[in-house]
Image (tube, helix red, strand yellow):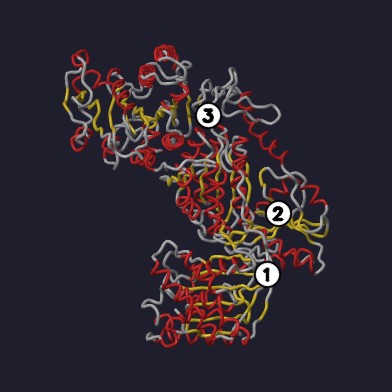
Amino acid sequence: MIDLTHRSAAECLLRLHDERLEIEGFQKGVPRWCAGCGDNAVLTAAQRLLRDEGLRPEKTVFVSGIGCSSRFPHYMNTYGFHGIHGRALPVAEGIRLARPDLNVFVNTGDGDSFSIGAAHWIHAIRYNMRMVVMVHDNQIYGLTKKQASPTSPRGTRSNTTPRGSYLEGLNPLTVTLGVQNVSFVAQAADWIPEMLYEILQAAFHHDGLAFIRIVQRCPEWMPDNFDPWLHDPSRVQLLHHPSSLSISSSLASLFPNHLEHDPSDIHRAREIASSSDPLPVGILYHDPTVPRYDEIIRSEATHSSASVRRLLDAEFDKVAVTGGELDD
Amino acid sequence: MSTVQSTRSELSAEVGERQVVTLTEHVVEIISDSGEGAQRCGQSFGAIAARTGNGVWTVEIIPAEIQPPARSVAGASGNRVRLGSGPITNGGDEADLVVAFNEQVLLGRVHARELKPGCTILLEDMWREHRDPRIAASYAETYDLLVAAGYRIIEVPMERECRTLVSDARRGKNMYALGMLCAIYQFDLGLAREQVALTFRKKTQALIDTNVTLLTAGYEWALANLDLAFHVPAAPTDQRQVVTNGNTALALGVVASGMEICSMYPITPATSASHYLSEIFPKVGGVVHQAEDEIAAATFAIGASYAGKCAVTITSGPGYSLKQEAIGLAVMAEIPLVVVNVQRGGPSTGQPTKVEQGDLLTSIFGSHGDAPKVVIAASSIEDCFYSIITARRIAETFNTVVVVLSDASLATAQQPYPRPEFDPAWLAPPVDQSHVPDGLQPYAWDETTGLSRRFTPGQPGGMYTLTGLAHDTSGSVAYDPDANEQGLHARSLKLAALQKTLRPPRVHGDESGDLLVIGWGGTRGAIEEAVDRLRAEGREVSSLHLRFLNPLPPGLKEIMAGFDQVMTVEANWSDRLDDPIIDETNRRYSALAMLLRSRYLVDVDTWSEVGGQPIKPGRVQRAILRKLDGR
């Protein structure tokens, strides 16, 4: 913590500079993800973000559920909460409510979020409590060794669907954009790290729940899944707008398909979100004015020994027994 | 209103003319169709009795449905009020006096064998002349049947009298009945009016006035027309007392414990605790979060506890089952958490509004793997308050889950108890944000106690990744067998360490004798009353009531050794030995009996009842006698 008392502004700035951590300051251990796994790109983007925003590791919590992506907190030198399958969001909500001063990030997968934890996903969007939610969507269960997930494309051959998965994959973006109180929805792809980083940064600055679906590769179980998009970059559509993200010239030269989209337009956002080919990448929807449940439900009153005593006295007065002698 | 004001002076004269029967206790029931307000009448009557200084215990009579059909035997809704000169600790046996708004709900209570033979019944008489001949016939038939069975029925024109004051007697008859009861039991009308104003404090003044008018009318009608007059002398006490139900006491306990976050999901019969908490908690900066489901309620509380002060989640059986995986996480990761389970009938949806103590074993052994957690059970209304304070303290001292068991018999029952005097030591300490000492690990388990110091986000130098996976002292995932065993060992040791701090429980009665009855939870009052009655007859029986169920307190084996026989009394299932297929090799014992048998190798017998009603002292008394006399 920076102590501002009895220090000149220059001293403080110097100290601030000293306390800023390099990227190594946020790294921990060696990730045990497969080579080529999209999780690595997300990890790098998150570590860059923490460095660039000058966040304190002790003031930052990464919360996850269960699955390959949920190993994420183990590789961050911050506080981490690697909980149980599907429940990252309510854990993060509890943290957020108890501690407005912390930076709360959630890393979860497509099975964790859209299957076992689906109820929490819908309600977390509605609560709009301030946090960044990264859904690592590789369209397959990886840790349990290749079962179809809700987002697996129809026909995906997996250990539980050896003849191909039966149903169309769920579109998490359109579902999310259908929830009342949605305030920030973006889509990123692990193979476009520059956009991933910029989306993450915008999400971090969003005053509410920022939902990022990260489309990512699973080289072990779904090696060819995104080949059509990788081989033909024009099948990726980069979203840009003066009020939102801009596309750098180097990125523009790699990905020629651009679409100007005003992220305040929810109807257009839903339309864009319904497409998987071309795959939209960027910020689909952003409304900074949506009320935050974590702010609404927190009461103005302060908790103290005196306020507790006062409340108990008042409540016990209402139910007091006068005793054997009537007092009138 | 002039007649109203003169009532008090008239009262003494009138009472002087009537034969006032003095009693040490009486059981009164007020029953109606759902929605006619008998519950409010009963609660108010109980509160007035308590404020007069009587010992009181009230029991809600609740139909399972919100709006059961009118005039149905299964639809009886209301309240039982047992009042006495001394302390009252349970709902007693059968009712002595009943006010019924129709004959069908009355019949429901007769069928449930809740009425004392020959008891007095004040019955709404509007049905006798009802325009539907079937209803009129049903009323007349039931009336004749009950009179023939020996009940003393007094027909009361409540509807007709109320209609002279309000257009819809359905909404007001309850206060008229309350007025009658206050006259019958010699309660002060001024106090009754105060209570009505308190009961309707959230309503308009006009509505309060109407209800006071109805109360007064009922009071005056009873004085003028009934020759019933009872007096249950109030024991003068200078002790300051309050009267609440168990769920209100739980909610006040949450406030008093210093917890600031409660996350819950609606479930009967636990929800009213959260209703009340939602009303008062914001005044101290607290929050009640109604989560999207029971699992979210538990994990939300876990997140809040992990990052701040211990949080609480309040539920009942089905919700408790759903929370099991989350509870295991809190045990594994050593996150303090208070889980309140206001038990109801099970399994599955079971009996949502009925009384059962069926969740003891699932509370102790629930969640997969070895998940040691603390289980305590409240045994009175007052205990509901203090159990939460104790639970919060243990949860944060031992960094673990503390389950507080209450049940439907405590949830809605009202009882006066000494007014708790707030002690700042009840509150949780501030969240530790100090720098973690260099080299200290998040699970630096003490070799003797298994305890370690919890790291909270925000503490510099304490960054670690909490995980539900097996982990070592650094919190890192444990891949080797030794580290896993070390964690299991430490978490288990914590219960032993807690047990070392507990005092042996106190025996109710002599410390030796023919039979020791052991109970837990909401059956305390009934068991101790049964034991007292039998001891007064010279029987050598004592009882023991356990507050700590996991760990069990020290000294139990020694206490049991002082008695020839030991038997638990519980409101959960046990096989009966007189069942032809049941014998010692296949008998399933009640939960506590099973625990005691396995831990102490003592031949603990059990008597249990799962009728969904609070266990009655008379029933316990007969069970004890059968045990003592070897029948």
Task: Give the distance between the C-alpha atoms of the residues marked 3 and 2, in whole angstroms.
Answer: 37 Å
Location of the C terminus of chain B (image quadrant): bottom right
The circle drawn on residue B456 is: 3
Residue B559, percent from left and from top = 79, 50
Q: Secondary structure at mark 2?
A: strand
- How packed mark 2 is, by other alpha carbons closer than 10 Å (few <14, some 14-19, many 20 or more), is many
Subunit under mark 1:
B
Tag shown at residue A204: none
Please tell me how crowded label 1 is: few (under 14), some (14-19), or many (20+) other residues with Cα within 10 Å: some
Front of the two marks 3 and 2: 3
A140 vs A242, left or right, is: right
Viewer-side residue, A58 vs B240: B240
Residue type marked 1:
Ser
Whether marks 3 and 2 lie on the same chain: yes
Name the residue that disc number 1 marks.
B85
Q: Secondary structure at mark 1?
A: loop
* Quadrant of res B112: bottom right
Residue B121 percent across, percent down from the top left: 56, 81
Q: Earlier in the sequence, mark 1 or mark 2?
A: 1
Chain for mark 3? B
Q: Is residue B254 above or below residue A203?
A: below
Residue B250 in view (yes/no): yes
Q: Locate residue A201, reporting x and y percent.
A: 32, 23
Give amino acid for label 3: Thr
Viewer-closest of B256 and A146: B256
Circle 2 residue: B545
Name the quadrant containing residue B67: bottom left
Up-down relation of residue B250 to residue B22 (above or below): above
Residue in the image at 58% along x and 41% along y: B427
Residue type at mark 2 is His
Left or right: where does residue A320 sit relative to residue A246?
A: right
Q: CA distance from mark 3 to mark 1?
A: 52 Å
